[in-house]
Image (cartoon, rainbow, N blue to C red):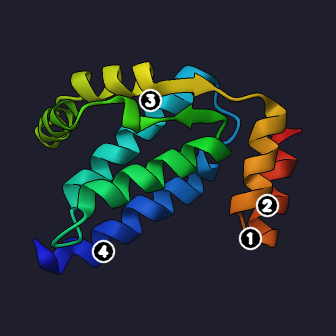
């Protein structure tokens, strides 16, 4: 419902921040956290058009700072639609399997490079300290 977009969106992104953007999680834990975040963002559905494209781009870039190279272009449009639909009904199996297939572990060096590239100076400092 439109009246809940702002408050629900704030809840989702405050939770992401409180979980320190999934820094320090092992590969499987990070993928699971990304699945959960993607499902929450999918349920939020804040835009009239472009939700799927925006979600995929955001989650792929976020994944890199938590040490995962998530390439959802490897998933078909049909599979993405089914997985997204299922996740809005609380069934994360298809989405989880898709993310696992599309996720590769990044080295610490690659992860640090993405943190340097994508994050503000303040956030960058905090995240890089967590990696030590």
Q: Pointer 2 and pointer 4: residues touching (CB < 8 Å)? A: no
Position of residue 4 in the picture relative to residue 117 (left or right): left
Residue at mark 3 to residue at mark 1: CA–CA distance = 25 Å
Question: What number is the disc on residue 32?
Answer: 3
- Viewer-nearest of labels 1 and 4? 1
Q: Pointer 2 and pointer 1: residues touching (CB < 8 Å)? A: yes
Q: Nearer the viewer, residue 69 or 41?
A: 69
Q: Position of residue 110 (x, y in %)?
A: 78, 38
Q: Position of residue 64 (x, y in %)?
A: 62, 43
Position of residue 91 in the picture relative to residue 99 (left or right): left
Give the mark nearest the N terminus, 3 or 2: 3
Q: Pointer 3 and pointer 1: residues touching (CB < 8 Å)? A: no
Give the mark nearest the N terminus, 2 or 4: 4
Residue to which mark 4 is pinned? 7
Position of residue 121 in the picture relative to residue 105 (left or right): right
Residue at mark 1 to residue at mark 4: CA–CA distance = 24 Å
Give the mark nearest the N terminus, 4 or 3: 4
């Amino acid at each position: 419902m439109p009246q809940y977009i702002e408050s629900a969106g704030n809840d989702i992104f405050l939770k992401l921040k409180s979980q320190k953007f999934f820094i320090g999680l092992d590969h499987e834990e990070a993928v699971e956290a990304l699945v959960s975040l993607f499902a929450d963002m999918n349920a939020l559905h804040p835009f009239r058009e472009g939700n799927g494209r925006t979600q995929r781009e955001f989650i792929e870039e976020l994944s890199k700072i938590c040490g995962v190279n998530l390439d959802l272009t490897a998933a078909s449009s049909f599979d993405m639609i089914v997985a997204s639909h299922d996740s809005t009904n609380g069934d994360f199996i298809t989405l989880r399997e898709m993310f696992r297939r599309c996720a590769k572990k990044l080295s610490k060096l690659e992860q640090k490079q993405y943190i340097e590239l994508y994050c503000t100076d303040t956030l960058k400092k905090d995240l890089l300290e967590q990696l030590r």
